[in-house]
Image (spheres, helix red, strand yellow):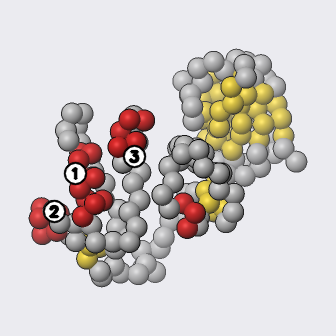
Amino acid sequence: MQKVYHKVESIAGNVINIRAQDIRYRELAQVTSRGKTSLAQVIRLKGEEVSLQVFAGTRGISTDAQVRFLGRSMQVSFSDDLLGRIFTGGTEPRDNGPALVDNLIEIGGPSVNPAKRIIPKNMVRTGIPMIDVFNSLVESQKLPIFAQAGEPYNPLLARIALQAEVDIIILGGMVGTMNKSQEF
């Protein structure tokens, strides 16, 4: 049963505070105010005081907003249906395709025990000498690309994606524009 509350105690930055009972840490909620619905997550519990981070920001949220707790933490579908798709940070399809609701797994589960991890062995050739020689990649490795504003990192990412000798490449971007995501 979903719990619904109709009073926001305070709003500070992207965090709203309400009074609620039987809520879990990291539980998701939908915050609806003035016809706009945003996803939020419990980030602090202190007795009946519940702090939620609103992912889309708190602009436009009033103190009489409806907060509906979903009884679960953030989940994403894990299947081959993800291939070729584009999603928002809230796991909603951005490509006008159907929502993926099968084989849902929690995001941010327990970390992997390094002693139990399989040691990567297979090198991934990117065709970029500075990466292949000095910072060789292996299968299943994450490659963070950090750059200052104005540096041409998108062409580098595109080149890695086009030249790498792998079956699947997953690109995840933060603080990118819609035009940049469409390029990929």
Image label count: 3
Q: Position of residue 167 (x, y in %)?
A: 38, 72
Residue at (22% x, 37% y) in the render: 148
Res. 31 image quadrant: top right
Q: Earlier in the sequence, mark 2 or mark 3?
A: 2
Asked if marks 2 and 1 touch (Cβ < 8 Å), the reply is yes
Residue 128's disc is: 2
Please name the residue that numbered disc 3 is placed on. Answer: 173
Question: Could you tell me the amino acid type at mark 3?
Answer: Gly
Q: Position of residue 36 (x, y in %)?
A: 68, 25
CA separation in Å, label 2 and label 1? 9 Å
CA separation in Å, label 3 and label 1? 14 Å
Q: Position of residue 16 (x, y in %)?
A: 65, 28
Q: Position of residue 123 (x, y in %)?
A: 25, 77
Give the answer, above or below, for where 100 lies relative to 43.
below
Closer to us: 115 or 169 = 169
Q: Which mark is in front, 3 or 1?
A: 1
Residue 18's disc is: none
Res. 110 image quadrant: bottom right
Local SS, label 1? helix
Please name the residue that numbered disc 1 is placed on. Answer: 156
Q: Earlier in the sequence, mark 3 or mark 1?
A: 1
Residue at (47% x, 73% y) in the render: 113
Closer to us: 5 or 20 = 5
